[in-house]
Amino acid sequence: MKFIQQQLSSKAPADRFTGDVWWDVIHAGQEPSRMRVNMVRFSPGARTNWHSHVLGQALHVVSGVALIGTRDGTVFEAHPGQTITCPPGEEHWHGAAPDRFMEHLALWEGNGDGSTETTWAEPVTDEQYNGPRTRELPYAAS
C-alpha cells in the first residue's frame, strides 16, 4: 500500500477553460494503472472547451449544478450524486450553471502508451452554453 502526497490546487489553463476553474489531482496513475482522477471546481458560468477522451470519461457531481453539452446542441443538467459518462471520442463540454458553483470528480483513463488521452478543441460559445437544457439524463440500462 502507498499513500499519495496531496498536491497543491492548480488553476485550469485559460486556453482550455472559460472562467475560473481549479482542480486537485486525486490520482494520476503510474503504470500499470491508467486511472486519472481530478476534483474540479467551477465558478458560476465557467466551463471547459469542447474536448474528447480516447477512452471516455465519467463525471460525478459533488456539489452545485453541472451542465454537460454535446455537439447536437443538448445541454444536460446534473445534480449532486449523479454520474455522467461520455463515451470514447464523443466531443463534449462541462461546467457550472450561470448562477451556481459546481464541483465534480472527473475520472478517465490514460492510454498506457503515453499518447494523447484528451483532444482539446475550441471554446464553447455563450450561445452553445445557454442552449436548451434538459434534466432528462439518458440513463444506461442496468
Image: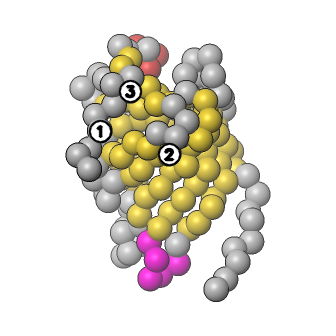
* Residue 52: image location, x then y, percent: 35, 47
- Taking 127 as reference, is 96 left or right? right
Specify start and end residues of the magenta stretch as a single range.
Answer: 30-34
Q: Nearer the viewer, residue 75 or 48?
A: 75
What residue is disc 1 on?
139
- Tag in front: 3 or 1: 1
Q: CA distance from mark 3 to mark 1?
A: 12 Å
Q: Nearer the viewer, residue 13 or 40?
A: 40
Under mark 2, the amino acid is His
What residue is disc 3 on?
76
What residue is disc 2 on?
60
State the residue at coordinates (70%, 50%). 10
Q: Earlier in the sequence, mark 1 or mark 2?
A: 2
Identify whether 133 is placed above or below 57.
above
Q: Identify the element where label 3 is drawn.
A: strand
Q: Earlier in the sequence, mark 3 or mark 1?
A: 3
State the residue at coordinates (55%, 27%). 65
